[in-house]
Amino acid sequence: GAVVSQHPSRVICKSGTSVKIECRSLDFQATTMFWYRQFPKQSLMLMATSNEGSKATYEQGVEKDKFLINHASLTLSTLTVTSAHPEDSSFYICSAPRGGGGTEAFFGQGTRLTVV
Amino acid sequence: DAKTTQPTSMDCAEGRAANLPCNHSTISGNEYVYWYRQIHSQGPQYIIHGLKNNETNEMASLIITEDRKSSTLILPHATLRDTAVYYCIVRPPLDTGRRALTFGSGTRLQVQP
């Protein structure tokens, strides 16, 4: 079945540095991908929608200059957390709809970001 | 998307069937019922979806009431690996490519040995 691969699965970085997270659709093309954030004991919250060939759209309250999204190809979207702070520590998850008539969405394994 | 209501948590004995309910009394005629689960520290996993007929796949069965106002996800023989948070989501299918899924609080299923 369709698979979405996310890398890295876990990252620890120092305050003020930037971290890039990659999301790849392995056996299908995704013109749209979604980025979520999940804090401990909470549900997934949509951060932004990544669109291949155009600018990402961000949910209210999400800083677009802090969370840079690039959808460079039909199989790759990246999320860069710039100038990370401890409050950015969270579980980041990407998702891509299957498309092609399928209606389910597929999710990456998630990235545990810890900012120290 | 129609609002869904799920119990906060449930326990189930290993090897027994786990029945997870979901209320969606405001569901529209074109909205499907989707179930996903999230095992701890992993991304969500698609389980099953349906419109009005009962559905079954290798993971689970989905029973939708005749009035479509509620549904039940059935894991026929729960194992410890089924311990997860289960999300019931109601939405139109053709919208999947344009809008992200909206997750509620889900049901935390704990399978007991």
Image: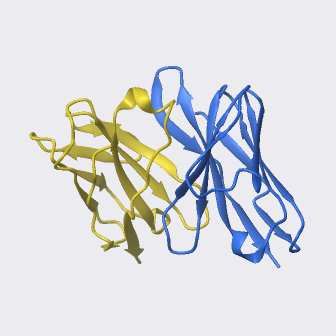
Chain colours: A blue, B yellow
Q: Residue furthest left?
A: B67
**In the figure, B81 relative to A8: above or below?**
below
Q: Position of residue A102 (x, y in %)?
A: 47, 26
Q: Position of residue A79 (x, y in %)?
A: 76, 49
Q: Nearer the viewer, residue B73 or A42?
A: A42
**Residue at image coords 66%, 41%:** A4
Quadrant occupied by the C terminus of chain A: bottom right
Q: Nearer the viewer, residue B63 or A43?
A: A43
Residue A89 in view: no
Q: Nearer the viewer, residue B8 or B75?
A: B8
Q: Position of residue A97 (x, y in %)?
A: 55, 34
Q: Quadrant of residue B62?
A: top left
Residue A61 in view: yes
**Residue at image coords 60%, 34%:** A2
Q: Position of residue A111 (x, y in %)?
A: 71, 60
Q: Quadrant of residue B54?
A: top left
